[in-house]
Amino acid sequence: MKSFDIKTTIYFGENALDRLAAIPAERILVIADPFVVKSGMIRLLTDRLQKVGKEFSVYDDIVPDPPIDKITAGVRVLLEYDADCIVSVGGGSAIDSAKGIREVARQMHPDRAVRLIAVPTTSGTGSEVTNFSVISDPEHNTKFPLVADTLLPQEAILDVELVKSVPPKIAADTGMDVFTHALESYVSTDNNEFSAALAEKSIEIFGAFMLRSYLDGNDTHARQKMHVASCLAGIAFNATGLGINHSLAHQLGAQFHIPHGRANAMLLPLVIQYNSGISKHSRSQAEYPKQVKKYCNIAQILGLRNFNTITTVRSLVSWVEYMMKEMDIPLCISELGVCTREEYFARIPEMADAAMLDSCTRTNPKRPEREDLEKILVEAW
Ligand SMILES: NC(=O)c1ccc[n+]([C@@H]2O[C@H](COP(=O)([O-])OP(=O)(O)OC[C@H]3O[C@@H](n4cnc5c(N)ncnc54)[C@H](O)[C@@H]3O)[C@@H](O)[C@H]2O)c1
Ligand SMILES: [Zn+2]
């Protein structure tokens, strides 16, 4: 027996932030990305809370790829303020921080219920609707996804006003994260018709609106569409899990601080080829594994259907590379300038070990050997 549910209530469309005036909470800790505070964007939230006389405090000691010590510091703040609700506003890092902070506080004080309302300011992680929180452990150079239903936000608010300021580079990286979520969910071993419908819609929107959204932050229609696509992909992968693309991206993020979506993008052409078994030199086979048909479905949604299975999967790989080039995302890690070749290769064994243990690996359509992951990391350089 299988089941599918969406426990987070999603507010979206024009003035979605107005929901804040009606949230059932008295004392609110706003956990915000520092950019949101510095840019003044925070007032879009705090003005609305103030207007209805809600008590709140703003906490913004948040960094990308949230490490354990920032979570611990946040727990102290949450408990001292004695909030009954967290409104988390920012990218995946701010939302994941809030999830981690609330979870630790809950385990310390199971009697104190704290509501979580997630307000994303990037269109990427889908963290507003997932039971994942990705935490970094800088001491061990690793990054791991916590997965538990208690991490799920009760509400998500998708308001396009908050994503207009995202610069093209971050729009590109986070957008590629959306595509990777949808695609990995679609080919996951735990996929089903419900998750597939969400993933397909997310990919259809990505195909139509990603480049528009990248090119112009004031293209409200395109930015709004990408914000919804991100959330759809989040719901999809929350139900199905992801795959080795994410297991490996977590390691690239932990070791070399490569932005999450960018790391995903650089791995994606290699992972599609690995999972499908189709590369430049492939010959046609009588029968392909299930995921190959799924990659072909996705190619069709993107308008890439080609003469046969091999050319269709290869056109999907080429299309991912084309999108990366259009959005100025380097195709390989050596182009990023984050480390030397020696530094990178020295860490490959460690990264492959950690990726094997990552919870995303379990639902990859093809069960990898450690050597397979090493090979992908070598090719990614
Ligand atoms: N929980 C999940 O389900 C899930 C899924 C995928 C990834 N993640 C994690 O989320 C994190 C990445 O999140 P992200 O990609 O959203 O990036 P992020 O939250 O780290 O933000 C990236 C940068 O964008 C800036 N920014 C955010 N909103 C902005 C805006 N509106 N305008 C201008 N700048 C803005 C931030 O200040 C930051 O410098 C990683 O740690 C990743 O592992 C979590
Ligand atoms: Zn991701």
Image (cartoon, helix red, strand yellow):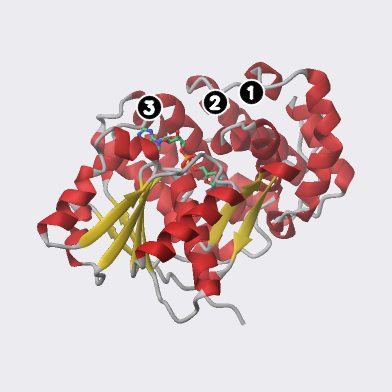
Q: Nearer the viewer, mark 1 or mark 3?
A: 3
Return the disc, 2 or 3, that comes first in the chain's sequence: 3
- Residue 371 can be seen, yes or no: yes
Ligand 2 neighbours mark 2 (CB distance < 8 Å): no
Residue 169 x, y percent position in the rendering: 45, 25
Q: Which residue: 31% across, 39% down?
A: 37
Q: Is residue 201 above or below residue 106?
A: above
Q: Is residue 142 above or below residue 152?
A: above
Q: Which residue: 83% across, 20% down?
A: 342
Return the disc, 1 or 3, that comes first in the chain's sequence: 3
Mark pair 1, 3: CA separation: 20 Å
Pointers 1 and 2 in contact (CB under 8 A)? yes
Q: Nearer the viewer, residue 217 or 302?
A: 217
Residue 52 x, y percent position in the rendering: 12, 62
Q: Which residue is mark 2?
A: 324
Q: Nearer the viewer, mark 2 or mark 3?
A: 3
Query: How many badges with numbers are in the image?
Result: 3
Q: Which residue: 29% across, 34% down?
A: 164
Q: Which residue is mark 3?
A: 167
- The amino acid pointed to by label 3 is Pro
The C terminus appears in which quarter of the rendering? top right
